[in-house]
Image: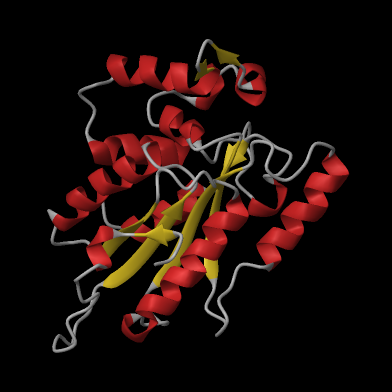
Amino acid sequence: MSRLFSRKFDSYRVRDEEKIDYKRKVFIAFEGVDTEPKYFEKINKFLNSQSKYTVELFIVNRLKDDGKSHPKHVRDGIIEFYEEIKEHFLKKKDRLCIIIDIDKHFGETEDIVAENYKAYLESLSTSDGTKIYPYVSNPCFELWLILQFEETEKLDLEKIAENKKTTKTSYIKKEYNRLKRKYKDISIIDAINNARINSISALLENNIDDLYYKIGTNLNDLFDYILGDIE
């Protein structure tokens, strides 16, 4: 059993070999064991309810008690996972993805972070050369969740950059919980599209090469791939 796993694959064929017109399969692994998996499971239910989408998400869950959330661990886990299911993986259609945070995973000083981050991005492929697509948020995934509800110009980017904890909750998580209650009736597709628009604001970074030192996220690229031009 790989360090990342999904119950979906314990006794499930990834793809029906008798079908000719396959959906694209997007396998996603995360650092987080709660917020990110729940969010993408909700999105997958939405996709499955809409016949116009030709993609299916597979959530590669990390063991909650493994104690390892470093991006290197997520990378190694999805590589191990790929080895288990690669006979069903169509390289021209399917995609391996990881969703990670910058936080303080790559070091303390900018030079060290830059070096470690670049080396990490260059390491993202399997033994047979299958690419692993990274989707990165700085400082964390909850930035994307906030962008579903709030225009970038209204965000306190200094507080987001610091992301200090008050009691047990970080600033970004507190903001997300507040905004989620305020906009509880927004549809999932409207929320996603808000984030897609807000994430490409000039105030935020969305170029993956620069996310190690700038506030922002390139998750918009993932949703461009998942949703395409169909809205």
Q: Nearer the viewer, residue 174 or 82?
A: 82
Residue that protrudes farthest toward the top in the picture: 167
Rendering quarter of residue 32? top left
Residue displayed at 63% across by 31% down: 203
Q: Is residue 175 above or below residue 36?
A: above
**Percent of width and height locating residue 120:** 69, 60
Residue displayed at 51% across by 38% down: 199
Residue displayed at 61% across by 34% down: 139
Give left or right: position of 215 versus 184.
Answer: right
**Percent of width and height locating residue 83:** 44, 78
Rendering quarter of residue 177? top left
Q: Is residue 203 above or below residue 16?
A: above
Residue that protrudes farthest toward the right in the picture: 111
Residue displayed at 65% across by 34% down: 215
Give left or right: position of 54 versus 153.
Answer: left
Q: Which quadrant: the N terminus? A: bottom left
**Percent of width and height locating residue 165:** 57, 16
Q: Is residue 223 above or below residue 42?
A: below
Q: Is residue 8 above or below residue 21?
A: above
Give left or right: position of 39 versus 172.
Answer: left
Q: Nearer the viewer, residue 98 or 189?
A: 98
Rendering quarter of residue 212? top right
Is residue 55 in sight in this rendering?
no
